Amino acid sequence: LRSSAPPLGRRQAAAAVAVAVAGGAVAVVAERAVAVDFEEFSPKPGRTIRLEYGGKGVAGATWSAGKFLAATLAADPQLSLLARTFPDGPRPKPLRGSSVVELGAGLGLVSIEAGLEGARVVVTDGEASVLPVEERNLRANGVTGEVMRLDWADGEGADRLAARSGPLDLVIGADLVYGLDDAHFQAHQALVDCLARLTSKSGTYTLLAHTSRSAKREAAFMEALDRRFDRRVVDTTAVGVSPPSPIIKLYALRPRAPSAA
């Protein structure tokens, strides 16, 4: 995967000054012209994805785990890695024609790659300021998809998304776990519940690219995941993709069967 640095250029763009979010919909209530940075990624030969930077905080950039997951989907659109990882499970559906939801999508790189492989994508993030940027990035790369705000703590919102997008074929996410304070810890627990709500009824697989940053906090997160999911490490080298760092891993998740009462 190639990343250009510094960003490729700047242009004038209409950017949202504020967005009103109601029921997951995005409404631009004011706009102004701003200079924006771009970066290009080549997840596989002959394909270039161009991303506009924007939004606030960690959502306004693309991180190594996201580039890694995008490259893996580009190398394996049939999702043969999932089949190898869970040989005892249902055969995963290829990306083409499948229904895919991304959590914490940031600028939308992974969703764009899935969309270019033919998936129907729903792009979500909890940071409202990044949603208009996601919409522009999808359009700029020729991907049709839905963009919506999803707070992981909003259980009813996750249930609604699962119901109207279902049956979901795949949930994806990259670099969703970081931070050491209690607020981040609570968000990690909410993420596990959100994943369960999206996948438990249909047995949907999840691909989660994770960067290890804090063993203490991550131990609690992994334990919470393991109570709800069968979690396995995916060997991406089988399709010619290597993690960019030893601290980055790709996990495949499958919901555990409910315990007998």
Image (cartoon, helix red, strand yellow):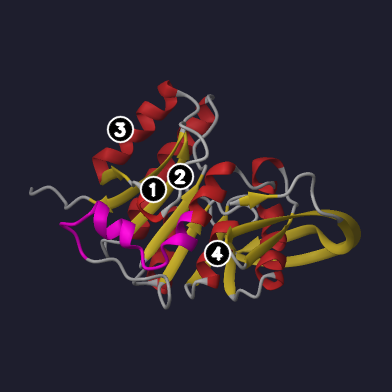
**Crowd band around label 1 with a 10 angstrom C-alpha radius: few (<14), some (14–19), many (20+):** few
* Residue 55, image x, y percentages: 73, 50
What is the C-alpha distance between the residues marked 3 and 1? 26 Å
In the figure, is residue 48 to the left or right of 212?
right
What is the C-alpha distance between the residues marked 4 and 2? 17 Å
* Residue 103, image x, y percentages: 50, 54
Q: Quadrant of residue 63?
A: top right
Question: Could you tell me the amino acid type at mark 2?
Answer: Ser
In the figure, is residue 219 to the left or right of 145?
left
**Of the residues tagged 4 and 2, which is closer to the observer?**
2
- Up-down relation of residue 47 to residue 214 (above or below): below
Which residue has dot 3 on it? Answer: 223
Which residue has dot 4 on it? Answer: 113
What SS does tag 4 mark? helix
Which residue has dot 2 on it? Answer: 242
The residue lying toward the viewer, choosing from 80 and 107, is 80
What SS does tag 2 mark? loop
**Of the residues tagged 3 and 2, which is closer to the observer?**
2
Which residue has dot 1 on it? Answer: 237
